Image: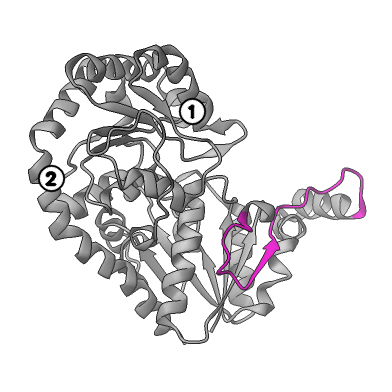
Amino acid sequence: MRIMMFAHGGSLNRGCEAIVRSSTGIIKEGIGGAKVFLLSDRPDTDRIIGTLDHIYDGSAIPISKYSPQWLMSLLRVRLFKDEKYALGQIHHNVIKRIGLADVCMSIGGDNYCYGEQPGWYEINRRIKKKGKKLVLWGCSIGEEDITPRKLEDLKLFDLILARETLTYNMLKNKGLTNVRLVADPAFTMEKIELALPIGWQEGNTIGLNFSPLVMNRNQQSKGAIRELISHILRTTDMTIALTPHVIEDGNNDFDVLNGYYREFKHTGRVILLPGNLTAVQYKGYIARMRFFIGARTHATIAAYSNLVPTIVLGYSVKSKGIATDLFGEEKLVLGIEEISSGELLASKFEEMVREEQEIRDRLKQAIPQIKQMSYQAVEYLRELA
């Protein structure tokens, strides 16, 4: 089976790296002789994933103004309200590779949470026109994200693999019959344990991840996180390890966390992990933490999968759905509007500390089942052959 992954923005988002890395691993483990190719917006960032059979440039190609393609696009849109030609030109790097694959796999995870996606709709239409199998791999979609046009696109897929129950139930309720429930592949990802930095307390270090995405959506959250750090330093003897997980220009966790580090480094109990580690290296640090607080979903998955009690600074259905599948409730998941209050964050932290052993016991019970659901995705994929 030849599998082409697309809708991937690049591995400077270590969550995206985790999806590609872990998916490639379980696919090759479960399907003998499988070849896995990746189409990436930033192929140079994906060279760190050595198990891929090939990495191609899948980035969009802007149409030059006044070029023949631009004039043809303008004509078709103006006269016929037809954007297919223009989208085909823009996404030519993906479309020209369709013939290499038996299965084309859209791997963006939450890509369908961000408005209409006409480019992907056109790519999907052309994949089906060429007679290839089309899979939406490990997705999360909120009911508020569904539009009539998006629903029609989702009907094109031969297989939709929802990574948590909230998405699965919503899509089933929308009448889709091509949906199966699995878990995020990153629950199965390996880890690499690097040397611990100076100041790390073994068994008594709490990880903190925060992102520009959350901060920009809730300006008060920046101050609330500062209050939380002060509370932890004041009421415990723990070390706080500030942990970036996305390091893209304009969306760099390291930049945000470095501000907190400069403010609190004088305490001797706040350290900042490097901003250039891979997903498996970050997971190696997160696995050795006592607690974790995180805004990036795959940073929290790294914690959950290593039985680390976690508070999720959630902003979409994926955070809520994953927690529900693990705990039977949205355990220690805060919505974007709730991250305004340092007092609330402190109370959730105290709750996590009080219930530390109970949470660990629950994760110890749930994680093997969740990992099995991750592997089940490959069984569903195999059935397409």
Labelled disc at residue 153: none
Residue drawn at x 23%, y 16% as measured from the top left: 231
**Residue type of the residue flagged with mark 2:** Ile
Residue drawn at x 50%, y 61% as measured from the top left: 20
Labelled disc at residue 359: 2
In the rendered image of this protein, does residue 226 appear above or below residue 275? above
Visual colour scheme: one colour
**Which sits in the foreground, 132 or 7?**
7
Q: What predominant SS class does the magenta segment belong to?
A: loop
Labelled disc at residue 212: 1
Residue 325 within the segment the image draws in magenta: no
Residue 47 within the segment the image draws in magenta: yes
Write down the quadrant of residue 380 in the picture: bottom left
Q: Residue 361: image x %, image y %?
A: 10, 51
Mark 1: few, some, or many residues within 10 Å (few <14, many ≥20)?
Answer: many
In the rendered image of this protein, does residue 186 appear above or below residue 354? below
Residue drawn at x 19%, y 53% as measured from the top left: 326
**Residue 109 as seen in the image, left or right of residue 53:** left
**Which sits in the foreground, 276 or 225?**
276
- Determine the CA span between mark 2 and mark 1: 28 Å
